[in-house]
Image (tube, rainbow, N blue to C red):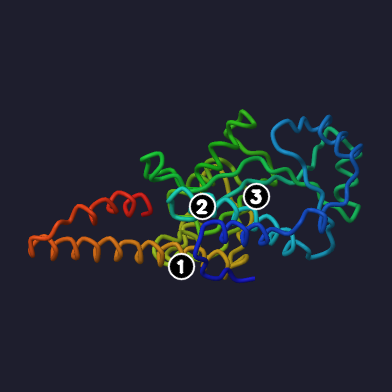
């Protein structure tokens, strides 16, 4: 599904709500089983998600979790930030519990836990490093009280990571990177540069990279955001020119100037 251009934030939120498939289409777990997993693996931050798994079915899994990252991107838009979202997920394979580990590898289910979510907060935090990936990584490290993420951790982001985010992903020991739209200006994995192939990281090697997951949707939300920003900027400029013409003619501009704060708030 490709997102269309909407007139209001409510219409965009409703559309993004439909982007994420219902858990009922994937989940197939019981309350008792879920409670057992919580108890054994100490799931006290985010719930686990059981997803049916078949051979070569990681496409459906990536599609689902990228939908959650898209929802984070919408949260960024609602706050006036560039709409980029990210989440960190780990596949639950606990060696201390043979039953969970055996069932996770032999049955048709995979159990995942969402460790953290994040969206772009550069303007909100007045912090150039507050990218969606870094916000998710910092929150996840705080949640698990360890800056080394567990094995099989997967980071989903709606936009190809930049060099700063890629270096942070390696520093936090993320094993798998999944991104949506390519970044022609700053993409550090494939589009603008290929840092993973340029040099081997001394401490951690990313095991896999998957790009282009829900590429159209991840790209469309960026295009719509900047299109709306340009429209609002032009609207403010046109309003300013109208005020200038009125003032030169000696007309009363008070009834026009009262709209200026509202225009800037909308930006």
Cα separation between marks 2 and 3: 20 Å
Q: Nearer the viewer, residue 161 or 84?
A: 84
In this rendering, the count of numbered labels is: 3
Q: Are marks 2 and 1 in contact (CB under 8 Å)?
A: no
Residue 144 vertical position relative to residue 80 in the rendered view, above or below: above
Q: Looking at the picture, how far across and down is residue 42, in whole percent? A: 77, 30
Cα separation between marks 3 and 1: 26 Å
Residue at image position (46%, 58%) is 195
Q: Earlier in the sequence, mark 2 or mark 3?
A: 3
Mark 2 or mark 3: which is in front? 3
Category of crowding for the residue at label 3, using alpha-carbon neighbours closer than 10 angstroms: few (below 14), some (14–19), many (at least 20):
many
Numbered badge on residue 223: 1
The answer to which quarter of the image holds residue 44 is top right
Check disc 2 and report its element: helix, strand or loop: loop
On-image quarter of the N terminus? bottom right
- Read off the residue under disc 3: 154
Q: Looking at the picture, how far across and down is residue 186, in whole percent? A: 41, 60
Q: Nearer the viewer, residue 156 or 163?
A: 156
Numbered badge on residue 30: none
- Read off the residue under disc 2: 200
Residue at image position (78%, 47%) is 49
Cα separation between marks 2 and 1: 34 Å
Q: Earlier in the sequence, mark 3 or mark 1?
A: 3
Mark 2 or mark 1: which is in front? 1
Mark 3 or mark 1: which is in front? 1
Check disc 3 and report its element: helix, strand or loop: strand
In this picture, residue 87 sits left or right of residue 199: right
In this picture, residue 117 sits left or right of residue 101: left
Residue 237 vertical position relative to residue 96 in the rendered view, above or below: below
């Amino acid at each position: 599904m490709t997102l269309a251009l909407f007139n209001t934030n409510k219409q965009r939120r409703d559309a993004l709500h439909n982007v994420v498939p219902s858990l009922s289409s994937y989940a197939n777990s019981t309350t008792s089983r879920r409670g057992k997993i919580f108890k054994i693996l100490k799931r006290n931050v985010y719930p686990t998600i059981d997803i049916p798994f078949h051979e070569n079915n990681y496409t459906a899994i990536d599609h689902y979790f990228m939908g959650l990252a898209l929802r984070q991107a919408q949260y960024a838009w609602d706050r006036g930030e560039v709409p980029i979202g990210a989440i960190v997920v780990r596949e639950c394979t606990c060696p201390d519990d043979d039953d969970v580990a055996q069932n996770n590898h032999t049955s048709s289910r995979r159990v995942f836990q969402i460790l953290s979510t994040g969206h772009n907060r550069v303007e909100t935090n007045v912090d150039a490093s507050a990218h969606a990936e870094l916000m998710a990584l910092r929150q996840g490290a705080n949640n698990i009280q360890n800056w080394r993420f567990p094995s099989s951790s997967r980071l989903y982001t709606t936009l190809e990571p930049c060099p700063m985010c890629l270096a942070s992903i390696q520093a936090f020991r993320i094993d798998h990177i999944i991104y949506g739209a390519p970044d022609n200006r700053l993409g550090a994995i494939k589009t603008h540069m290929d840092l993973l192939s340029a040099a081997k990281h001394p401490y951690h090697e990313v095991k896999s990279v998957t790009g282009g997951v829900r590429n159209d949707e991840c790209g469309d939300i960026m295009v719509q955001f900047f299109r709306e920003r340009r429209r609002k900027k032009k609207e403010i400029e046109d309003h300013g020119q109208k005020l200038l013409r009125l003032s030169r003619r000696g007309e009363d501009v008070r009834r026009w100037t009262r709209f200026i704060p509202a225009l800037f708030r909308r930006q």
